[in-house]
Image (cartoon, grey):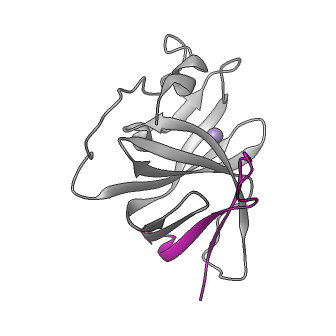
Amino acid sequence: MSLKEYKKKRDFKKTAEPEGREKSGPHGPKLIYVIQKHNASHLHYDLRLEMDGVLKSWAVPKEPSADPTVKRLAVAVEDHPLGYEEFTGTIPEGEYGAGTVEIWDKGTYQLVEKSEKAYVVELAGKKLKGTFYIVKLKPGEDKKNWLFFTKK
Ligand SMILES: [Mn+2]
């Protein structure tokens, strides 16, 4: 887990996004869960889960769903710093991710299971609640594509 890629992509003199610090310990007694609606060149939803001192992140091209018949593609992106869960506003034109960011859902979560190819989490948000799965589409390959869904 590292913020190197996050920092490399951004000019903190131009964007109001948090510069962030590497942290080793947990942020608080409960792990952070957030989904930010990011209206950039393509509208998407950024799913972020606190893990090992950073926010592990996936970009979900379509609105996440509490409907167990709906599975969403979730593309792994760079780790974001703790504190990013509070960020809303506009990333200026010409900067990485230019566009608006708002909170779509926010809360805490519990990690139920974690492996190379899947995370099982218990989300306690306002829109999404209960057991959700983030499953790698092609286990074994270095692919960024995961699926994000719940079950009955
Ligand atoms: Mn984004």
Pick the front one: 116 or 3: 116
Q: Residue at x 42, y 27 (%)?
A: 18
| Residue 120, placed above or below residue 36 | below
Q: Residue at x 72, y 82 (%)?
A: 69
x and y percentages locating residue 44 in the rendered image? 70, 49
Pick the front one: 140 or 137: 140
x and y percentages locating residue 28 in the rendered image? 23, 50
Pick the front one: 125 or 116: 116
| Residue 123, placed above or below residue 4 | below
x and y percentages locating residue 120 in the rendered image? 50, 69
Q: Residue at x 37, y 45 (%)?
A: 52
Residue furthest to the left in view is: 29
Quadrant containing ligand 1 reads top right
Label count reads 0
Q: Find the magenta span and give its range.
A: 123-152
Q: Quadrant of the C terminus?
A: bottom right
| Residue 31, placed above or below residue 21 | below
